[in-house]
Image (spheres, rainbow, N blue to C red):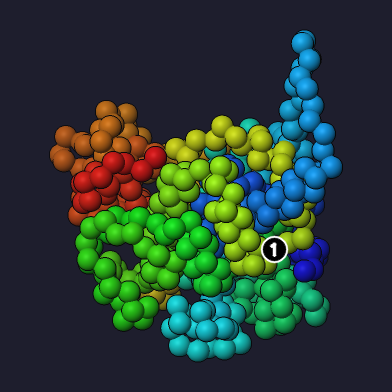
Amino acid sequence: MASPARRPSRAKDSVPNLAHTSSNEPLHSNGFVNTHHVRTGIVLAITAVLAFVATFAGASYLDFFNTVKSTGVKTIAQKGQKSTEIVDPNSGQPINIVLMGQDTRDGSTNSSIGGGTMAGEHNADTTMIVQISADRSFVNLVSIPRDSMVNAPSCETTKGTMASRGTVMFNSIFSAAYTYGGDISSAASCTTAALASLTGLDLSLFVVADFQGLKKMIDAIGGVSLCIPQDVNDNYTGLKLTKGLHHLNGTTATQYARLRHGIGDGSDIMRTVRQQYLIKALIAQVLSKNFLTNSDQLYQLVHTGVSALQMSEQLANVNTLMGLAYSMRNFSTSNLYARTVPTEAYPVDANRVQWASGATTLWTKMKANKPIALQTSTTKSSKKKSSSTKGKVNSKTGLITESDGTLRDPKTGGTVDPETGVIKDPDTGYSMGYADQYLAATVCAVSAQK
């Protein structure tokens, strides 16, 4: 597959520098190689949610491992001899990757899960930015609502330069570039270029998967358990679930990831919240099984993942995969920080949103290689938020209960709906995540997911 095309200078474009950087260029890396490895756990979970980077790493490693093993000679440890550790070639550098879920109905599986035919169409159903910290101690995961109104810079496609566009829906960047360039490389590269311009982050690497890929991946790990806070009855996907704990197979979990109607407010924002929740549940599922000691399951998982992916070519480097995997060997899933980019109502259209001022703070933290935990601002609600999060955290629910009974999430400072477990941004009122530990402890009365 073609590598992400070099983007031209924005000097000729009318698109504003929304990243608020000193340069008028969209910031992007030169493509330092980035991926993950099966044994890290967190990688497999992110992979299963419409990105699946880890399965590629796993398959590459297995091929490499089998080849080396056939010619290898056992080394006998000698007294006083120091062991040699695998080196992460990107050590000390944060790694950013754009994960995209493609909404295509090509093929029977995609059509049955997506609903309808829409053959030949290629839309962006889900987009996330994953950042692995420089010291590999934490991972930031930020969802980009597809209904966000943004400015798209010009970008290079397989068939030439696609002109910049002002005030468009974010997901239209992917579909427009696919139509213009005629391939996934164009669509993914232009989406990545737009995010680099909008956020100011170093972005050039991407992974794309479709409905079928997500289904296969989840089936390969034996399904996933989710605590559903409300009854679900969605005529679009055909998904029907009662409130409570459910173990979903690949098809139903993928429908859950796509779910927009039949639960909650029907917004795209809430869909990103559910997708983040699915990531955490997948992590718990993956870590509950030792895939490293079960070679049959491991092979099935990575083999399935390879067939489900389309990615930037810089990701295929076995040495880098092994080094990164080793450097993340002690990663704790409690250090996965997931949220949706802060949004507010778009004045022109009530069905659309625009990024709120809090987005700037979010990107600033990520550019500084910091966890996207509690945000700070000067608003009254934020000041209240900062002080209230100093209270005692309930070990069972993971939340703080204020004197007036308000539940607050200590990581984000958001208020939590006691009925649904949805975390709300105290400044904008928009949903920003699920209090999954709270849901598990109250709605489903099971042990909290770690």
> Where is the C terminus found, in terms of image quarters?
top left
321 to 154, vertically: above or below: above
Q: Is residue 2 left or right of residue 400?
A: right
Which residue shows up at 72% across the image and 71% down it? Answer: 185
Which residue shows up at 56% across the image and 68% down it? Answer: 213
Q: How many numbered badges does the structure rendering display? A: 1
200 to 370, vertically: above or below: below
Q: Quadrant of residue 3?
A: bottom right
Q: Position of residue 367 (x, y in %)?
A: 62, 43
- In this view, the residue in front, 344 or 420, is 420
Q: Position of residue 438 (x, y in %)?
A: 27, 45
Q: Amino acid at mark 1?
A: Met
- In this view, the residue in front, 2 or 350, is 2
- In this view, the residue in front, 439 or 318, is 318
The residue sitting at the left extreme is: 404
Which residue shows up at 50% across the image and 89% down it? Answer: 117
- Residue at label 1? 311
> Where is the N terminus found, in terms of image quarters?
bottom right
| Label 1: element kind | strand
45 to 255, vertically: above or below: above
The residue sitting at the top extreme is: 80
Q: Position of residue 26 (x, y in %)?
A: 71, 57
Q: Is residue 186 left or right of residue 432?
A: right
Q: Is residue 150 visible?
A: no
- In this view, the residue in front, 187 or 329, is 329
